[in-house]
Image: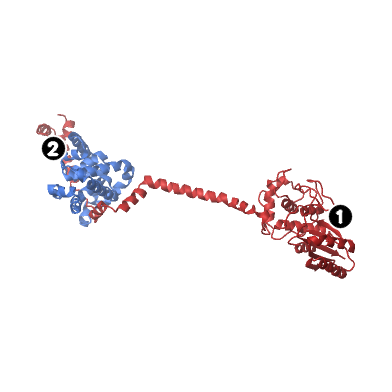
Amino acid sequence: MREVEAGDAPRFLDRLRAGEATAFEELVTTYQHRVFGVALRMLGNAAEAQEVAQEAFLRAHRGLGDFRGDAKLSTWLYAITSRLCLNRLTSVERRLVRQGEETLLRLSDDHRRPDAALERSELESALARAIAELPEERRIVVVLRDIEGLAYEEIAEVLDLELGTVRSRLHRARADLKEKLERFLP
Amino acid sequence: MTCDETRELLSGLLDEALTPEDRRTVEGHLEGCAECRRELERLRQTVALLHRVVPAHAPVGFVDHVVAAARPRPWYRRAAAAVFLPLSAKLPVEATALVMIALLAAQLYQGTPTLQQAARQPEPASPTGPSEPRARASKELKDVRPGQTPRAAPLRETDRRDLARQEPATRPESQTPASPQPAAPAPAPPQAPAPAGAPTAPAPPVPMVSTAGSGVAAPPAGSPAPALSKAEQLLAQGQAATSRAETESRQATLERAAGTGEAPSSARQAAKRAEPSTDVVARAPVKDRDAAERDLAELIARVGGRQTQQRRDQDATIVEAVIPRERYAEFSQALATAGPWRVEAERTDLSGEVRATLRLPQ
């Protein structure tokens, strides 16, 4: 399901640091869906998500010289993206409250499988709404964990949080979602 | 471990993220607590729902956009962006442009009347259009305070009289309309002498030639004066007949000097024919107009002058002639010996050629 973490190969990092254009293109190609996905779930708006995702890659491009390689490239990109999203949310939170639900519903449609999309539309709408209604500090944790599949330690690194804080926020986010999605549980 | 403490760790238990010690403690609690086991199951089902969220896909062309945006821009685009793109630079520039446009508009708005006023300044020395003096006279009247000598007394006098004709005689000067009087397309027909109560600008005493039979002396400055005296003042003040206003002044002079017995229209026409200027106005009642015209023509020719115009009205003949200044005394004496000539107005500073308007009423 996830792209192979080939981007963390030492030779690839060297190519990136050397400013090789094809290396940066490979980086964007490898991580575009993950970065865009986090931005979309956090912001609830495709246009804003695309803007933030592009800005995240451009910042990474400018900061490649400073990337020491201590963390994985994906963790580094998630950190940049999460920070950009949280910063933007502080300024457009009210607008997102109004627009997020509608946009998330639209973007959750699976155009490649319209029949399946019809079957799952109600559940996905509820999921999207429930995620969008979470407080942003819990939302980013549950997105990184349950949608993007990051480990606790990786989330703590991305968000620069204590492991206990990640665990606590994740538990509260899941508890909120359980209440909101009660009717879909067997 | 209580139920609340246990439930705090249920997410970690699901994700196998607990320490072995916490894991044993939680599992021990769950064996004896059906409610917490049920809570764990609900949480597991919720996480399973979250895993069903369709992964998002970046838009088509996203990679190309990012790669293109990451390419270094040419230096001139970077320079242009540095100047124009940041709001911190754009906003002040745009605000400054707006302010400058507003200031320019205000300056143009205020400068227009100034330009109009400046266009009037050289008027006394240059010919002007026919409709300007009235508007200028009205404006300048506002600037003249009681007892203050106007800057151009003769013109003010003429314009003031014209203004007095157009306005009610009882209208005080302070009620002069603030806006300039609309320019009349044609001179108003001559009327009776200006009303006694009409505002009169003070004029300096003017040396006048003692004219035979006229017996008219210059009135004290500032006092109401007959129209003839005003006309003589205007002639004696040596104002060159260059402007329309002065032309009208002379027209008024000629109208009054020619007497009030004729129709206003003929007097006006006679005045018009006296243009561009007249230095002497004289008249002599005659019994035979034809003979008088012939004699006058001979006299003019004898003194080296030339007759510029002659017109016969129903009851008078008006002759306009130019007499050399050095022969003017001879011409004047010959007129006096020929008949009852009366010089009604005569300039004191005759020089060069003397332009005379001679009226021969029958």
Mark 2 or 1: in front is 1
Q: What hue represents chain B?
A: red
Give the label on residue B278, or none.
none
Question: Where is residue B354 drawn, in percent x and y?
Answer: 78, 60
Nearer the N terminus, badge 2 or badge 1? Answer: 2
In the structure shown, which secondary structural element does the residue marked by tag 2 occupy?
Answer: loop
* Quadrant in the picture for the C terminus of chain B: bottom right
Disc 1 crowd, CA 10 A, few/some/many (<14, 14-19, 20+): few
- The percent position of residue B260, horizontal first and vertical second, equals 83, 59
Q: Which residue is mark 1?
A: B214
- Name the residue type under label 1: Ser
Q: Write down the chain letter for disc 1.
A: B
SS at badge 1: loop
Q: Position of residue A16 (x, y in %)?
A: 18, 49
Looking at the image, is B264 positioned above or below residue B177? below
Q: Residues within 10 Å of mark 2 (few under 14, many from 20)?
A: some
Is A52 placed left or right of B355 in the picture?
left
Residue A61, above or below B252: above
Q: Amino acid at mark 2?
A: Ala
Give x and y (percent) for residue B334: 87, 63
Q: Chain of mark 2?
A: B
Residue identified by numbered label 2: B17
Q: Nearer the viewer, residue B149 or B193?
A: B149
Whether callout 2 and callout 1 share a subunit is answered yes
Q: Colour of chain A?
A: blue
